[in-house]
Image (spheres, grey):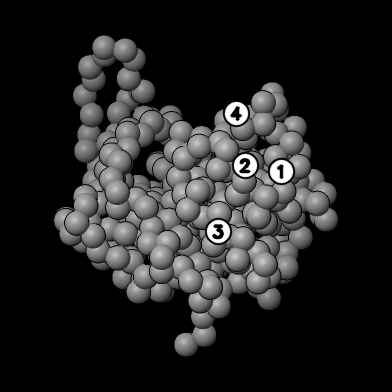
Amino acid sequence: MPPAELLCIGDISVDTMVSIDHQPRRDEKQWAQMIGSFSGGMAANLAVAYTRLGGTARLLARRGRDAHGALAMAALLRTSIDVSGVEEVDAPTFWTLSLIDRKGEKSMVEFLSEAIHPPWAAVGDGAGARVAYTIGSETAAALEPFRRFKSAGMWTVVDADYGELENESSLRALLGVTTIFLCNSETGRRLSGEKTAANAARSLSADGPQTVVITLGRHGALAVDRTDGRARVKGRRVEVVDPTGAGDCFAGAFLYARLRGWPLRPSLEVANLAAAISTTAWGCQTASPTREAILAMPDISFRSLVER
């Protein structure tokens, strides 16, 4: 079997979804409905999105010897992801409680565990992958492996959320050996000190990445690339059920497109569409689309790129 194109080094989690009327105010009580628990984790979600579109991925992560770990692993075993690098450890599986209101807005409580940290000792030379991906909580541990990967000609990708960031200084160092940096608008503004997402992308690109992508939620996404310039796409209107993990799906679809030589704008467009589709069902991975689901959508300008 040939090596996987994408090496995902990060987290596995379980997301427990609760439906509420609105996001709670201070000292407020309200009725809620338990929806269920679903496989998640930024790295796992991205690997699912990437492979659903037809790519190949290997996941390096940890999960606990508990019911959450069994649930997450059972879901991943139903995919084409190579999970031989997932270690079972004596720590609780990382999990989150997601509160989703009737407008599709969310807030999340994360239950930290040592199992969130992947087995970096097993990374080696990247096992023949073309791209290596990691998350913002792993910036210090990722620095030396990413230096090796970049020197060997691999793409290196960091996806960061400010609330989960290990620390800014280690991220700054990592950006110097990062090919693609992805974040949401709040993270981009806080890291750069800029007031707009466009200015934040330009500022962060000066730290080293070839490409900076900033997601804008329902308003779409924008990107700055040193070769391809700038691009921005509007959001897609869908009936949102659960927005959890949409950014991970976006990242997986964007990497799938770029690794296949797509131009910047259609790469953003397919990622934006995939992310929108992923919000139409409960669970981060449930509605992550296949190529066939993308092609079934009307009025897509990048159809010929998907079909080839």
Q: Is residue 205 above or below residue 293?
A: above
Residue 144's disc number: 3
Quadrant position of residue 112? top left
Residue 186: percent from the left, percent from the top? 57, 30
Distance Cα–Cα, label 4 vs label 3: 25 Å
Which quadrant of the figure has residue 201? top right
Residue depth check, mark 2 versus mark 4: number of the one nearer the observer: 2
Name the disc covering residue 190, or none: 4
Do the residues bearing badges 2 and 1 touch, measured as CB atoms within 8 Å?
yes
- The quarter of the picture where the C terminus appears is bottom right
Q: CA distance from mark 1 to mark 4?
A: 15 Å
> Is 223 positioned to the left or the right of 285 in the image?
right
At label 1, the amino acid type is Asp
Q: CA distance from mark 3 to mark 1?
A: 17 Å
Q: Nearer the viewer, mark 3 or mark 2?
A: 3
Q: Position of residue 1 (x, y in %)?
A: 47, 87
> Residue 215 location in percent, x, y?
60, 41
For marks 1 and 4 on the same chain, the one whose residue lies earlier in the sequence? 4
N-terminal of the pair, mark 3 or mark 1, is 3
Q: Secondary structure at mark 4?
A: helix
Residue topped by disc 1: 207
C-alpha distance separating marks 3 and 2: 14 Å
Upstream in the sequence, badge 2 or badge 1? 2
Q: Is residue 2 above or below residue 78?
A: below
Residue in the image at 65% along x and 64% along y: 150
